[in-house]
Amino acid sequence: MSQIEPSVLTALTTAAKDAVSHPATALTLKATDVGSNTAIAHRDALVAALYRRPSQVAKARKEAGETPPAPPAPAQVEIWSLYADHVDDPFLRGHLHHLLLDAGHGRRPDHVRGAAIGYLDTVQLLLTAEDGHRWPRAAQCLKRAGELSLKFKQPDLRERATKDALTLAERLLAGTEEEGRPLLAALETLQTLKCDVADLAEQAASLFTHDMDVRLGLLDALRKDAPPSRHAEIDTAVVHTLLDAADTADAGHRRLYFLTQAATEAHKRGLPDLRARAEMALQQTTPEGTSIRTEGTIPPAVVLWHQDQVDAAPELRTALWITVQDIHPAMRAQAEAEADGALEGLLRIPRSRINPAGPVFVRPPVDADDDLAVAMQVRGLRLFGRLTAIQLDRIGERFRPDESEMTAALAHETVLPEPRARTLARAFRYYWLQEFDAAACVALPQLEQILRQLLRPQVPVISVARGQSAGGVDLMGTLLQSMPKAGYPADWSRALELLLVDSDRGMNLRNDILHGLTGTPPRHYVALILQAALYLLSHAHGQRTPPGTTP
């Protein structure tokens, strides 16, 4: 087994001194010359540890949808174990033991106690320090120590963490407005440790009013420990906090957000008068101040990720299916909310309208879509179109498919026979030549025919002549509404309606383009049309679970 490299331990100790965070320590350590190749390997393993986050933070990242970090290499873990008990800095010592605990290395009790004691020793140092950045780190250390003491049943450490958290909370209560966030973290840690913080939370809520998020957090902490008789009073304070934030908002969209949150919270907490007040204010907010931007800058990392997806495809057809490998993101939030029965969040508050003839509320039907929800969904469609355009452009650059290759990739014996597949292939070719008008006009009729052929086995799409009725075929709007009956996801049905035929609040591309009501559509609009055709074809080609079957 390797031994500690003195030059590395010295460099680590020097880098950790006065550093405000582990990444700051890592930057200094990485730039330090430590000598031999073995020492460099130790240094790099410790740099990797400093950039790694412990289990509870990693769990939170996973719940937020982020990709969890890869497991550390066994050689790295062995190096961490060499240095864990020899570093002077208690924060770093606790961090290394926490990582070793996560990795399942050695004896679990040793690492539990090593991590918790390291964090608590750090708190003691910070309580007496003059460092201006000490309070957030102290609150973080207390949170981690408290979680470890509870999870692994360490009563002595739990008692110590409770005492330190109370000391920190009392110290911060006498501080300034800027110390509200670490105070909230300290109170949340105390509640995790099963302590009643009602008195502390009430004092804090009356003192720390500058930061809205902190005040809301303090009110929620107070409500958890307050008797039920006080819940209505606290709920009212929550909504008033949001209404006050809306009144002082420096931008229209921020005012819109705070008012929506106020209406949501008032609805959830059973405060109809405050909900009506928030809704009235929402309706009086001018459109100029609250318009939803449809364009923005896509981060380079997102662009690279979408391009890498195409680059990883083994052949053309697979690359085409990659552009539609998930349900439509613009609709997902609403679909999940409906499934959960939720009535909260920016997109889910059923809003009243104001009669322009007087201050009288006009209630829309219960099942009517909220205007703001639809606006956000359309915005999501446009963003999704830009991401799809990135992938279609990459497909064109990588494969440079000619008409025959695209025809072979798209063709399906019953849904899109070769002659029609060749026509749709030309739409893609027009897109890559930046002839967007031609691409859209060629693709839209094929899209409608693909949908009709897909639905034919499940729902009637042709009506026969009867009496005075001449019969006919269902057109795009009716076909899209029939998709859920045929077993296709309702979120995609709604997305395609907004994209193609909703003339009231949607993009209405099919009608506007084919009826000559618009100019040349933007690239990402055409990308959405082509992607819709690919989505439907992916069902025909078996890339998705066929309707009526269980995955």
Image (spheres, helix red, strand yellow):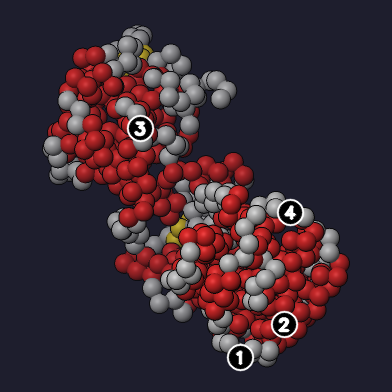
Dot 3 amino acid type: Ala
Q: Count neighbours of disc 4 (C-alpha within 10 A) and say few if under 14, some if 14 to 19, many if 20 or more.
A: few
Residue 13 visible within the image? yes
| Closer to the eye: label 4 or 2 | 4
Quarter of the figure with the C terminus: top right
The residue at which mark 1 appears reads as 130
The residue at which mark 3 appears reads as 313
The residue at which mark 4 appears reads as 106
Q: Earlier in the sequence, mark 2 or mark 1?
A: 2
Query: Dots 4 and 1: beta carbons under 8 Å?
Result: no
Q: Count neighbours of disc 2 (C-alpha within 10 A) and say few if under 14, some if 14 to 19, many if 20 or more.
A: few
Q: Earlier in the sequence, mark 4 or mark 2?
A: 4
Query: What secondary structure is found at the residue carrying circle 1?
Result: loop
Q: Earlier in the sequence, mark 3 or mark 4?
A: 4
Dot 2 amino acid type: Gln
Q: Quadrant of residue 272?
A: bottom right
| Closer to the eye: label 4 or 1 | 4
Q: CA distance from mark 4 to mark 1?
A: 37 Å
Residue 68 visible within the image? no
The residue that appears at 71% across and 72% down in the rendered structure is 118
Q: CA distance from mark 1 to mark 3?
A: 56 Å
> Is 318 on the left-hand or right-hand side of 63?
left
Dot 4 amino acid type: Gly
| Closer to the eye: label 3 or 2 | 2
The residue at which mark 2 appears reads as 124
